[in-house]
Amino acid sequence: MAVHFEDDRVRIHKIVASPFDNNAYIIVCKATGKSLIVDTPRDADLVLAEAQGTDVTAVAITHGHRDHIEGYDAFRAGLTAPIGLHREDTPRLAPNAPEFHLEDGGTLQVGELTLDLLHTPGHTPGGVCLLLDNHLFSGDTLFPGGPGKTQTPEALAQVIESITGRLFVLPDDTNVYPGHGSDTTIAAAKEEYAHFASRPHAPDLCGDVLWRSS
């Protein structure tokens, strides 16, 4: 079992899938056995196998980039649980459509666990993070070392506003579980961002931005 974190209430599984090394997560309520899957990358069979023995109640897609939705059909075929995506990214899923929308300020109930939904646009218009206690599933909004890739300076400004305005208000000890790669914490991300904010930057800056070197 790919158990990434466990305490008396929750068990979090992390599965690395697809040629893009996507992180898919399974959040399990230990009291009820109900679970939520985060993201639908290719290699759905790996994720669905890891979820066996739990009652999957929903799937939440953090954003609509291809690598996070490429396994949608396989997840849809393998589950009866509804799949949700923010409405701003719904066109990226076409010709498919989500069964429900992830709304800013909304919640997802997984047994006795409640996850808060935070709309964090910039990497895509419909990027969403999920917060469970001090565990933040950040999709491609925030990684160790920087934000998710942006296509325009305006999108970079938007994702920075999402990070500083929505995520950096969380407690410093909040664990951040991104859509690719290793974990970080809000404290570490704030320290890295301080280096970026202390320097001038070209007005056309965007793309793969790193807090310490861009």
Image: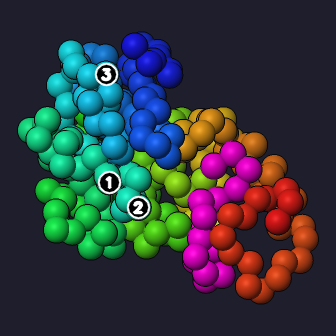
Q: Which residue is mark 1?
A: 69
Three-letter amino acid code at the position of disc 2: His
Q: Which residues are magenta?
A: 143-159
Rendered view: 159 above or below 27: below
Query: On residue 65, which mark appears?
Result: 2
Mark 1 or mark 3: name the one nearer the start of the chain.
3
Mark 2 or mark 3: name the one nearer the start of the chain.
3
Nearest the eye: 77 or 158: 77
Quadrant in which residue 111 is drawn: top left
Rendered view: 93 above or below 156: above
Q: CA distance from mark 2 to mark 1?
A: 7 Å
Q: Is residue 186 left or right of residue 162?
A: right
Q: Quick one: label 3, few (<14), some, or many (20+) residues within 10 Å?
A: some
Three-letter amino acid code at the position of disc 3: Glu
Secondary structure at numbered mark 2: loop
Q: Residue farthest to the right?
A: 199
Quadrant in which residue 10 is drawn: top left
Q: Is residue 152 left or right of residue 83?
A: right
Three-letter amino acid code at the position of disc 1: Ile
Give the x, y percent position of residue 22.
47, 42
Rendered view: 15 above or below 61: above
Quadrant location of the N terminus?
top left
At x 20% / y 31%, what residue is drawn? 56
Quadrant location of the C terminus?
bottom right
Q: Is residue 148 magenta?
A: yes
Q: Which residue is mark 3?
A: 50
Residue 58 in view? yes
Task: Kindly check if marks 2 and 1 are in contact, taking CB atoms under 8 A apart as contact.
Answer: yes
